[in-house]
C-alpha cells in the first residue's frame, strides 16, 4: 500500500475521531443550526443541529498534512515545501468562515461577519496565493482550455484578476451548494477526487498527497453529515473546501475545467443569479426557492434524492472532464 493510500485512510480515521469528539462538544454548547422560517418546512426540524462542523474537516486536514510534511521533509524536500502554501490558502478561507460562524452562533449575531469584510478577507488571501503561484513557484500564466486540448498563455495583468475571480467564485459556489444534508461534502469530494486523478496524470506529487488527505477528511466528515445529518459544516467547511477546489485547479493550470467538473456548484450559482435578476425585474420567481436544490425539495424530492442526483451528475461531469484532457 503506497503512502498516498495510507495517508487517505489516516485522514479519514483522524477526521472520524475528531468528529466523535467535536460534535458532542458543539451539541453541549448549543452551537446549532438556525433555520430560515421562509425555507423548506422540512428543514425546521434541523433547528439546533450542531453546525460549524467544518472545523472537523479543517483540523483533520491540518493534522494529517503536518504528518505528511514531516514524512516527506527528508525524503522529498520540494514536495514537503509545496504542501504548506496550499494548506495556508485553504486554512485561511476556513478561518474566515470560522469567524463568520462564530459571530452567528456564539455571539448570536444573525448577520455574522459583514459581507464586505468577508469578501475583503477572501480577496487578500486570494491575492497572496495567486502571487505565490506566479512569482513564488513561477508556474507562469498558461491555462488549459478543455475540448480544444490546448494551453493559452494569458497576459499577467489579466491572469491575476482572472485567478482571483476563480477563487472567489468557486468558494461562493461551494458555499451556496451547502444547503442540504451531505450535498456539498459529497459533490466536493467527487470534484477533488477528479482533480487528484488529474494530478497523477501530470505527476504533481504535492497535489496527489494533499488531494488524498482532503478526500479522506471529507469522507470522514460525511459520516456525520449524510442524511439525517448529525452536524453541518457551516461557512467554516464550505469556504475551506472552496479554497481547496480553486487552489488545486489553479495549481494544475486547469481553472476553466471547473466549469465542467464543478457543474453543480456552477448551476447552484446561476440559479441564484437568475432568481434575483428576474425577481427584481418582474416580481416573479423562476424557481420555488434558490439555490436550485431547494427548488427540488419544494417540488417534492427528498433530500437524499437530491444529493444522489447531484452527486451522479458531478460524477459524470468529472468522467467527461478526464476524457477531454
Image (cartoon, rainbow, N blue to C red):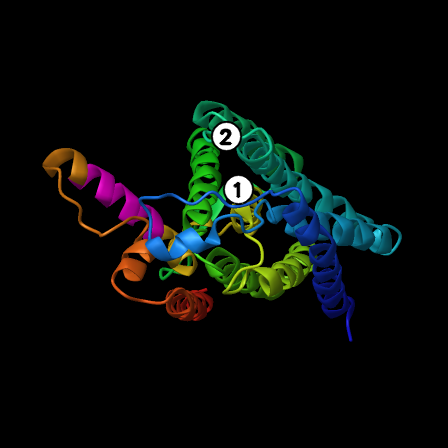
Q: Does 293 sit left or right of 96 as displayed?
A: left
Q: How many numbered marks does the figure carry?
A: 2
Q: In the rendered structure, find residue 112 and report the number of the disc placed on it.
A: 2
Residue located beneath label 1 in the image: 235
Residue, far right: 74
The residue shown at (31%, 44%) is 38
Q: Position of residue 235 (x, y in %)?
A: 53, 42
Contact (CB < 8 A) between labels 1 and 2? Answer: yes
Task: Name which residue lies at 55% across and 63% down.
Answer: 198
Q: Quadrant for residue 280, please give it.
A: top left
**190, 186: nearer the viewer:** 186
Q: Which residues are magenta?
A: 267-278
Residue 15 x %, y %? 70, 58
> Could you tell me residue 171's position as x and y percent?
48, 43
Query: Compared with residue 269, is residue 192 higher up or lower down, i.e. above or below?
Result: below
> Is residue 145 visible from the viewing direction of this image?
no
Label 2 Cα neighbours within 10 Å, binned few <14 / some 14-19 / many ≥20: some
Corner quadrant of residue 306: bottom left
Q: What secondary structure characterizes most of the magenta part?
A: helix
Q: Earlier in the sequence, mark 1 or mark 2?
A: 2
User: Which residue occupies 45% across, 66% down?
Assistant: 318
Determine the residue located farthest toward the left in the rendered image: 282
Amino acid at each position: 500500500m503506497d503512502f498516498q493510500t495510507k495517508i487517505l485512510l489516516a485522514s479519514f480515521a483522524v477526521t472520524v475521531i475528531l468528529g466523535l469528539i467535536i460534535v458532542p462538544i458543539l451539541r453541549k454548547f448549543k452551537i446549532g443550526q438556525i433555520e430560515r422560517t421562509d425555507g423548506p418546512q422540512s428543514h425546521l426540524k434541523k433547528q439546533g443541529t450542531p453546525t460549524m462542523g467544518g472545523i472537523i474537516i479543517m483540523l483533520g486536514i491540518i493534522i494529517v498534512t503536518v504528518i505528511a510534511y514531516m514524512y516527506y521533509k527528508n525524503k522529498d524536500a520540494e514536495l514537503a515545501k509545496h504542501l504548506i502554501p496550499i494548506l495556508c490558502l485553504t486554512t485561511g478561507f476556513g478561518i474566515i468562515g470560522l469567524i463568520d460562524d462564530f459571530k452567528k452562533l456564539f455571539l448570536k449575531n444573525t448577520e455574522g461577519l459583514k459581507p464586505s469584510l468577508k469578501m475583503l478577507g477572501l480577496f487578500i488571501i486570494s491575492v497572496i496565493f495567486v502571487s505565490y503561484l506566479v512569482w513564488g513557484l513561477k508556474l507562469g500564466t498558461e491555462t488549459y482550455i478543455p475540448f480544444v486540448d490546448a494551453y493559452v498563455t494569458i497576459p499577467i495583468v489579466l491572469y491575476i484578476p482572472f485567478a482571483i475571480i476563480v477563487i472567489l467564485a468557486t468558494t461562493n459556489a461551494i458555499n451556496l451548494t451547502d444547503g442540504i444534508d451531505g450535498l456539498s461534502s459529497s459533490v466536493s469530494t467527487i470534484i477533488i477526487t477528479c482533480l487528484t486523478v488529474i494530478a497523477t496524470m501530470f505527476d504533481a506529487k504535492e497535489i496527489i498527497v494533499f488531494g488524498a488527505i482532503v478526500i479522506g477528511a471529507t469522507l470522514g466528515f460525511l459520516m456525520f453529515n449524510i442524511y439525517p445529518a448529525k452536524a453541518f459544516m457551516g461557512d467554516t467547511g464550505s469556504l475551506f473546501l472552496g479554497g481547496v477546489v480553486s487552489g488545486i485547479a489553479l495549481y494544475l493550470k486547469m481553472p476553466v475545467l471547473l466549469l465542467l467538473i464543478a457543474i453543480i456548484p456552477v448551476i447552484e450559482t446561476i440559479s441564484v443569479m437568475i432568481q434575483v435578476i428576474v425577481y427584481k425585474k418582474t416580481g416573479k420567481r423562476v424557481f420555488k426557492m434558490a439555490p436550485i436544490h431547494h427548488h427540488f425539495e419544494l417540488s417534492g424530492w427528498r433530500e437524499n434524492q437530491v444529493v444522489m442526483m447531484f452527486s451522479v451528475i458531478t460524477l459524470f461531469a468529472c468522467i467527461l472532464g478526464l476524457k477531454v484532457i
